[in-house]
Image (cartoon, helix red, strand yellow):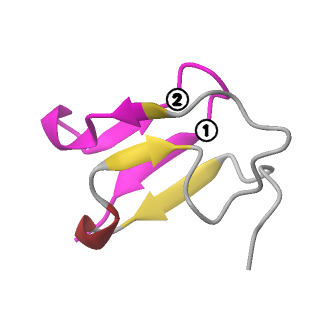
Amino acid sequence: MLHENTKKHIEIAEKDLPLHCPMPDMVSWNSHPRVFLEIEKEPNQEIICPYCSTKYKLVK
């Protein structure tokens, strides 16, 4: 099922890596270009998409 790109805080798991925004379950007609986000390299395991400002957090 596809979801509108309205969530601004998304928790992801290791199975979702490599992380890219928009994510596969988001609709694409109103999305920005796909960008890969290297969340694993961030000290707090959080990263913000430079296009849409969605904040991702890697949870283990």
Distance of label 2 from label 1 (alpha carbons): 5 Å
Q: Secondary structure at mark 1?
A: loop
In the rendered image, residue 17, in percent from the top left (x then y), is placed at 28, 57
Q: Residue at x 55, y 54 (%)?
A: 23
Residue appearing at x 61%, y 27% in the figure: 33
* Above or below, 11 relative to 8: below
Q: Name the residue beneath numbered marker 1.
A: 54
- Front position in the image: 9 or 24: 24
Quadrant of res 25: bottom right
Question: Given the image, on which type of amino acid does mark 2 rest?
Answer: Cys
What is the x, y in percent for residue 24?
56, 60
In the picture, measured across the screen, residue 24 lies left or right of residue 39, that is right
Residue placed at 73% from the left, 80% from the top?
1
Q: Decide: few, some or many residues near mark 2? Use Cα within 10 Å; few <14, some 14-19, many ≥20.
A: some
Residue 49, label in figure: 2
**Image quadrant assignment for residue 42:** top left
Magenta residues span: 36-60
> How far across and down, in percent of the image, does residue 43 sit?
16, 35
Q: Position of residue 41 (x, y in %)?
A: 14, 34
